[in-house]
Image (spheres, coloured by chain):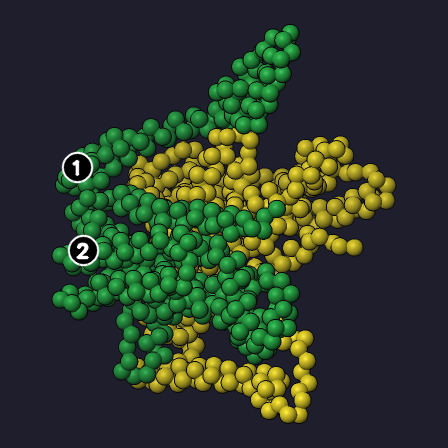
């Protein structure tokens, strides 16, 4: 841009002068050739690297396109047709996509999880708009989550009841991540405040909880949830597997969210606390009205990143026997007629995960820029 | 924290004692502690009752009992007749092995990818950023399944194993590479290497002192490299240069000889390495970008050469930014190695899981998990904090 403007200015000056002829920049400095020379072949070793990489890409990409698109079986077909073809078997996905997306949810009722996911995604899209960041958004979320839960579980309004053991696939993944964040967040705020408290006992307990949970893998927390929760409860009280895993994820998320919120709290200048004190606000008034609104605003971008991490981590619930997206993709592979199409199955859910996580991370970057717009110099 | 710290704690006599901040602090702490202890006590009480009802003897006595299950990969000798305690040791060592190798490889690949993203070669930068975005946005567990699928389903059987280089075989039973036959000289070569390390350190100190005193430089890094390679080489030649290398051979249905990576280990190692490398690449890129451009301009103005600018000006400053987040990536890698249970690599969690199923000692097994991972996390934190202090800015 700047180059062009400069070039135009120079040209105009030359024209006004009238004597110096207008000379175009040499072909090796501008246009396609100039770009190639500047970005791919600027030194001898860069030229070598470029050529080697181009050679490797030429080796890989045609085969990949052939497998993905050209030789792939697109129309519904049997496994035999797929095995005979050299490309990907998208017929497998066509056959199994409802199992992969919704797990073992009753086939005739699958419009319910579809609707629930659609509502949920609509809410997420709406929440991306900063104009909607008002208190009623939280209320709207609560209502939508309630509707989603009712749709999934049924038992009212003529919907047949579907036990949680049959839930699976994408709705389960979204649910585990969302409730992990929604319930873990208040816990995390309390823990973050506790970690910065001047009461030694409160501080110590918070630090111990946060550091212990962050020091062990999620799998051990899930194992603990699935094996030890039944032992914790008095005789006769039982909690189903899904809720236990959800509780494990909430406890795990709370520790990580606490650290995110603490980061926000630490960024609040001391003057804010002192000003609140001098106005005569109590600790809770100051926290609620002065400190948290500022701290949470700062921690929104890292919060989105934590949510991305949690969205990916929910895949671990397969270890305690739940069929989330990864679990149902594996389950689809156990059909003896369709054995061996793991590439298609994994590719399908990898694309789903990628679309979700990539768009969220782009949104978080965008948000960071927008939220810093006021403070940037 | 600052809220009440500087508040005047003297109270006038007319104020009731429950408005006294000191009283309140103590009161709230006692209430919190009582609630936490009460809650834990309630859970522990329930657990004890439930365990008694299930006839599970709590305690770690089961560690001395015979395990009765085989473990495919073990670094110390182990058989099904050994105890559960030994099985746990095998698992811990397997976790160590994959975590250590993963950390080393992820650092190398991560640094390369991070620098590549900043390359002025457009193709290199684009490919590196595609790598980072794809790896970061797909769950690790799914990546492990994909690697495991690639190795066990897509690679040919041992009979028509891929043979890219002489002596290296890739098959669905794992990767086979040639390995030198064990020989006593290897022990002495190890000692020679340690001696070379000590010699290099002394050389470094001497060269530094000489440079401070006289201003003369000494090529420390090249000499140290020569020492580190030279000493073991001399030991090897003196020992008669035993050059027996065992090449893997196909016998029956599988390979014999050489060194082998099982499919489970290979899948776990690749998955952990490439996943974590993507995060390290972003950290490295951020660290280098954070060093202000004026620093390298000033260095060039002082007449330093390109390599020297990188080594003396940019890297030391970038490292300070890179180290702390890299530490947490190392911790993540170590913790993520517990995903081994999903593909059947016998790490701590997977062996603990088998033990739990056989004995019902869930509480003890989970206690062992937590203890081991906490110790591992703390060790890595302490080591990296020590390194971080060593390179931290010394303010005068």
Among the chains, which one is yellow? B
Among the chains, which one is green? A
Tell us which disc is closer to us: 2 or 1.
Answer: 2
Q: Are marks 2 and 1 on the same chain?
A: yes
Question: In the image, is A302 to the left or to the right of B350?
Answer: right
Mark 1 belongs to chain: A
Q: Which image quarter is the C terminus of chain B in?
A: bottom right
Residue at 29% across, 62% down: A144
Mark 2 belongs to chain: A
How dense is the environment of label 1, judged by Cα within 10 Å: few (below 14), some, or many (20 and up)? few
Residue at 28% across, 35% down: A68
The answer to whether residue A34 is visible is yes
Question: In the image, is A40 to the left or to the right of B72?
Answer: right
Question: In the image, is B208 to the left or to the right of A22?
Answer: right
| Residue under numbered circle 2 | A111
Can you say whether B265 is above or below A290 in the image?
Answer: above
């Amino acid at each position: 841009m700047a180059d062009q403007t400069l070039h135009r200015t120079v040209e105009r000056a030359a024209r006004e002068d009238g004597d110096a002829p207008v000379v175009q920049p040499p072909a090796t400095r501008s246009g396609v050739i100039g770009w190639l020379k500047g970005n791919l072949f600027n030194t001898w070793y860069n030229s070598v690297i470029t050529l080697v990489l181009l050679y490797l890409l030429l080796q890989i990409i045609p085969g990949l396109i052939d497998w993905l698109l050209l030789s792939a079986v697109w129309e519904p077909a049997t496994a035999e047709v797929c095995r005979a073809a050299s490309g990907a078997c998208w017929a497998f996905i066509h056959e199994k996509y409802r199992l992969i997306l919704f797990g073992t949810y009753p086939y005739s009722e699958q419009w319910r999880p579809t609707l629930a996911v659609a509502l949920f995604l609509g809410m997420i899209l709406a929440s991306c708009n900063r104009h909607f960041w008002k208190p009623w958004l939280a209320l709207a979320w609560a209502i939508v989550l309630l509707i989603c839960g009712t749709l999934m579980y049924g038992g009212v309004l003529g919907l047949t009841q579907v036990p949680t053991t049959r839930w699976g696939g994408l709705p389960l993944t979204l649910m585990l991540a969302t409730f992990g964040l929604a319930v873990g967040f208040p816990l995390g705020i309390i823990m973050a405040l506790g970690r910065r408290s001047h009461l030694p006992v409160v501080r110590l307990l918070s630090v111990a909880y946060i550091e212990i949970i962050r020091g062990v893998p999620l799998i051990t927390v899930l194992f603990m949830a699935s094996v030890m929760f039944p032992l914790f409860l008095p005789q006769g009280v039982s909690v189903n597997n899904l809720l236990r895993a959800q509780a494990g994820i909430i406890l795990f998320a709370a520790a990580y969210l606490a650290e995110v919120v603490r980061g926000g709290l630490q960024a609040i200048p001391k003057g804010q606390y002192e000003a609140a004190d001098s106005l005569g606000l109590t600790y809770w008034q100051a926290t609620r009205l002065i400190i948290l609104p500022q701290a949470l605003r700062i921690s929104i971008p890292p919060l989105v990143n934590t949510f991305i991490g949690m969205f990916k981590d929910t895949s671990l619930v397969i270890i305690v026997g739940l069929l989330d997206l990864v679990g149902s993709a594996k389950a689809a592979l156990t059909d003896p007629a369709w054995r061996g199409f793991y590439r298609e199955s994994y590719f399908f859910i990898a694309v789903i995960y990628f679309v979700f996580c990539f768009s969220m991370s782009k949104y978080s970057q965008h948000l960071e820029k927008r939220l810093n717009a006021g403070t940037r110099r | 924290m600052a809220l009440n710290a500087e508040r005047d704690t003297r109270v006038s006599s007319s104020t009731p004692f429950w408005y006294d901040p000191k009283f309140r602090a103590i009161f709230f702490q006692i209430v919190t502690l009582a609630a936490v202890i009460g809650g834990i006590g309630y859970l522990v009480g329930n657990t004890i009752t439930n365990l008694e009802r299930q006839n599970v003897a709590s305690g770690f006595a089961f560690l001395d009992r015979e395990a009765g299950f085989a473990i495919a990969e073990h670094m110390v000798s182990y058989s099904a007749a050994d105890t559960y305690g030994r099985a746990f040791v095998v698992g811990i060592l397997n976790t160590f092995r994959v975590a250590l190798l993963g950390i080393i490889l992820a650092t190398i690949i991560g640094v390369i990818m991070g620098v590549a993203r900043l390359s002025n070669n457009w193709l290199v930068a684009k490919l590196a950023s595609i790598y980072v975005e794809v790896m970061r946005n797909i769950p690790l567990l799914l990546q492990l399944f994909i690697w495991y699928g690639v190795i066990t389903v897509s690679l040919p059987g041992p009979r028509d194993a891929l043979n890219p280089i002489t002596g290296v075989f890739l098959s669905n039973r794992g990767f086979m590479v040639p390995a030198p036959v064990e020989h006593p000289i290897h022990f002495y070569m190890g000692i020679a290497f340690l001696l070379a390390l000590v010699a290099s350190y002394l050389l470094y100190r001497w060269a530094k002192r000489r440079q401070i005193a006289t201003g003369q430089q000494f090529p420390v890094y090249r000499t140290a490299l020569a020492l580190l390679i030279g000493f073991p080489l001399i030991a090897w030649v003196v020992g008669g240069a035993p050059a027996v290398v065992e090449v893997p051979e196909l016998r029956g249905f599988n390979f014999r000889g050489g060194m082998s990576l099982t499919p489970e280990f290979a899948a776990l190692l690749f998955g952990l390495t490439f996943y974590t490398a993507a995060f390290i690449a972003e950290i490295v890129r951020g660290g280098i970008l954070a060093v202000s451009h004026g620093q390298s301009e000033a260095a060039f103005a002082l007449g330093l050469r390109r390599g020297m600018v990188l080594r003396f000006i940019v890297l030391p400053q970038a490292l300070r930014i890179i180290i702390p987040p890299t530490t947490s990536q190392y911790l993540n890698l170590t913790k993520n190695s517990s995903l081994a249970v999903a593909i059947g690599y016998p790490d701590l969690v997977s062996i603990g899981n088998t033990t739990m199923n056989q004995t019902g000692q869930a509480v003890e097994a989970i206690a062992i998990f937590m203890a081991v991972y906490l110790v591992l996390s703390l060790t890595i934190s302490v080591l990296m904090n020590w390194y971080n202090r060593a390179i931290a800015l010394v303010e005068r």
